[in-house]
Amino acid sequence: APARFTLDPAFAVGDVDARLFGSFVEHLGRCVYTGIYEPGHPAADEAGLRTDVLDLIRELGVTALRYPGGNFVSGYKWEDGTGPAGERPRRLDLAWRSTETNRFGLSEYIDFVRKVGGEPMMALNLGTRGVAEALELQEYANHPSGTALSDRRVGHGDKEPYGIRLWCLGNEMDGPWQTGHKTAEEYGRLAAETARAMRQIDPDVELVACGSSNQGMATFAAWEATVLQHSYELVDYISLHAYYEERDGDRDSFLASAVDMESFIENVVATCDHVGARLKSKKKINLSFDEWNVWYQARFHAAEPPNWEEAPRLLEDNYSVTDAVVFGSLLIALLRHADRVNVACLAQLVNVIAPIMTEPGGPAWRQTTFFPFAQASAYGRGRVLQVAVDSPAHETARYGEVPLLHATAVRNEETGAVTVFAVNRDQHRPLPLEVALHGMAPARVVEHSVLADADPEARNTLTDPERVTPHPGEGTALADGVLTATLEPMSWNVIRLG
Ligand code: AHR
């Protein structure tokens, strides 16, 4: 039987915030050094940024760029990354057992963000530091001039303030692995007081409080409730992080990873609204899903830990076409909740669990996951329509019965163009799809793009960088207000109607 759903612009989820297509640059492995920044590389610009990588980042269509961590930020002194490059200290990075040269810091990051047309999203160290250092960074970065810290920035060569509006109040503070890990009470108080003070400098900053590091944490939901009980009126967002990997060869469960992601989002929304109800608040806390991806953590934990090298090769997962289909499904999960998820960051951007890979001194190329992200960012702007699928289903070990179709649709309110994003979770069989269009009349199928491969392990590598790319779908048609298509086995699909 075909999978079916109906689209009607009268039934919308909400408008997509451009920052749903954010990403993340951490001082981790080769994300910064030999990733985006490599002075001396043939493609490096005058600032040492790799222009081949900048081009790929623009093509990817990333918006918000979270920086500088991650676990790294919880031991970071932001001042180390300012001022003349030759005078910057070398430091131990406890999070990744690496040596941080600080050659790349705040000014270089802002230059990078501007060159790719992104928006800064700055994480604060609330692990080893607190309110005072957060305020100092905010003053250095955003105050025009005339104070010691703003004039220090001007003296460092950056006359224009950085205008950082979006701030993360720490990173994964619920995790025992985090430097300066805290209880929910301790962190909730610190987040509230940091937020209160930052708003004294600028009431319009947007602040993200740390939620849980994943839905499986023992403190999940209680953590969010306690943190928000302290900070509800002072912060705008609560963060979510989630990484998925195939375990024990159970591919059907892996392909259903978005079931976990959607339940995570819905449980955090419920928790936020519960606290809001208890506080009798009119305000809504929205979500910043500021780390998400496929990540083979089991491989990372099995590998030798680094020994204080500079920019070691860490977390350099090479993604298969299977990973890209799951990744596309995670994008669908985010879009389906665009009413409450305003910010999301693909973790990470280059080399480290990333859609873009580089070789030091050599080329840059697109991983399989590059394509779903670029397409979602290009065509997933506008209003998300409600999609209630009527689909054949199958049993999975991890998530029970799961529909084979996972889908969402976004309508461009100005042009009337509609894009359907759909994943067929069936590894072996094609899935016929029928979409009834009500209350709108797109004239034709502009494109049906498919990411799938006869070899589920196919991937792009340094020696074969274009092994996997999207191809056109066949037989897709629009007639009498009904879209019909066939979704290849285990595929990511983008069907554009205009
Ligand atoms: O993205 C890699 C790491 O995953 C981040 O540093 C941390 O926040 C998370 O645990």
Image (cartoon, rainbow, N blue to C red):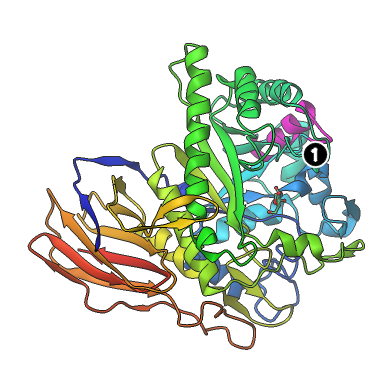
Viewer-proximal residue among 393 and 323: 393
Residue 304 % position (x, y): 87, 66
The residue located at (51%, 13%) in the rendering is 278
Task: State the quadrant of the N terminus.
Answer: bottom left
Residue furthest to the left in view is: 480
* Number of marks drawn: 1
Please give left or right for residue 282 compared with residue 88 in the image: left
Q: Which residue is mark 1?
A: 176
Position of residue 101 in the picture relative to residue 460 (left or right): right
Residue 437: image quadrant is: bottom left
User: In the image, is residue 497 part of the stretch drawn in magenta?
Assistant: no
- Where disc 1 sits, the SS reads loop
- Amino acid type shown at disc 1: Pro
Give left or right: position of 186 versus 322: right
* Rendered location of residue 89, percent (x, y): 90, 53
Q: Which quadrant of the structure image shows residue 30?
A: bottom right
Q: Tell me the residue at 18%/47% (across/down).
A: 8
Q: Residue at x 68, y 40 (%)?
A: 141
Q: Position of residue 11 (x, y in %)?
A: 23, 40
| Magenta extent | 127-142
Q: Quadrant of the C terminus?
A: bottom left
As rendered, which of 62 and 496 lies closer to the eye?
496
The answer to whether residue 89 is seen in the rendering is no
Is 150 located above or below residue 396 in the figure? above
Residue 128: in magenta span:
yes
Q: Nearer the viewer, residue 142 or 364?
A: 364
Which image quadrant is residue 113 in? Answer: bottom right
Query: In the rendered image of this protein, does residue 1 appear above or below residue 266?
Result: below
Q: Magenta span: helix, strand or loop, mainly? A: helix
- Would you say residue 135 is visible in this rendering? yes
